[in-house]
Amino acid sequence: MPTCDYPGCKVEGTKVSRLSPEGFLVATGNKAYSFREAYKRFHYCGEHHDELMKSVWNRVRSTDGKGDDHVAPTAI
C-alpha cells in the first residue's frame, strides 16, 4: 500500500481520493472520458483524509465571495 500523500506523512495511505493535499482536483492532462480518468488519484491516511474533507467542506459552506453576480459555470 502506498504512503499518505499529505506532506511529511509516512503513514500507510488507506484512503483513495481525487483531492490534492491542497483540497483541489488536479487534472491528469490526458484525454479522459470519465471523472476517474480526468483527475489524479491521491492516497491518504485516515487522519489526513478526514482533515482534508473538513477543510473542503468548510470552504464550500463559507459565504465568502458568493454574494457577487457571477453565474455558476454549470448554468451555461
Image (cartoon, grey):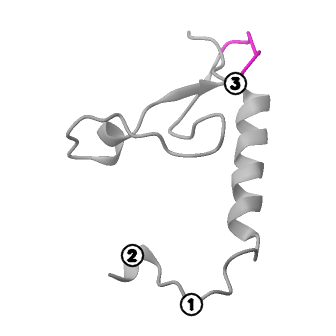
On the image, which quarter does residue 48 sit in? top right
Compared with residue 70, is residue 11 higher up or lower down, i.e. above or below? above
Does the residue at mark 3 contact the one at mark 2 (Cβ under 8 Å)?
A: no
* Magenta stretch secondary structure, dominant: loop
Residue 56 in the image, given as x and y percentages of width and height: 69, 53
Residue 76 in the image, given as x and y percentages of width and height: 32, 81
Q: Residues within 10 Å of mark 3 (few under 14, many from 20)?
A: some
What's the distance in space between the residues labelled 3 and 2, CA to CA? 30 Å
Does the residue at mark 1 contact the one at mark 3 (Cβ under 8 Å)?
A: no
On the image, which quarter does residue 10 sit in? top right
Q: Amino acid at mark 1?
A: Asp
Q: Going 77% across and 50% down the picture, which residue do you hit?
A: 54
Total numbered badges shown on the rendered structure: 3
Q: Is-magenta flag for residue 8?
A: yes
For disc 3, the marked residue is 6
Does the residue at mark 2 contact the one at mark 1 (Cβ under 8 Å)?
A: no
Q: Amino acid at mark 2?
A: Thr
Q: Amino acid at mark 3?
A: Tyr
Q: Determine the secondary structure under disc 1.
A: loop
Q: Going 41% across and 74% down the picture, which residue do you hit?
A: 73
Q: Is-magenta flag for residue 11?
A: yes
Mark nearest the camera among 1 and 3 is 1
For disc 2, the marked residue is 74
Q: Which stretch did the figure color magenta? A: 6-12
Q: Earlier in the sequence, mark 3 or mark 2?
A: 3
Q: Earlier in the sequence, mark 1 or mark 3?
A: 3
What's the distance in space between the residues labelled 2 and 1, CA to CA? 14 Å
For disc 1, the marked residue is 69
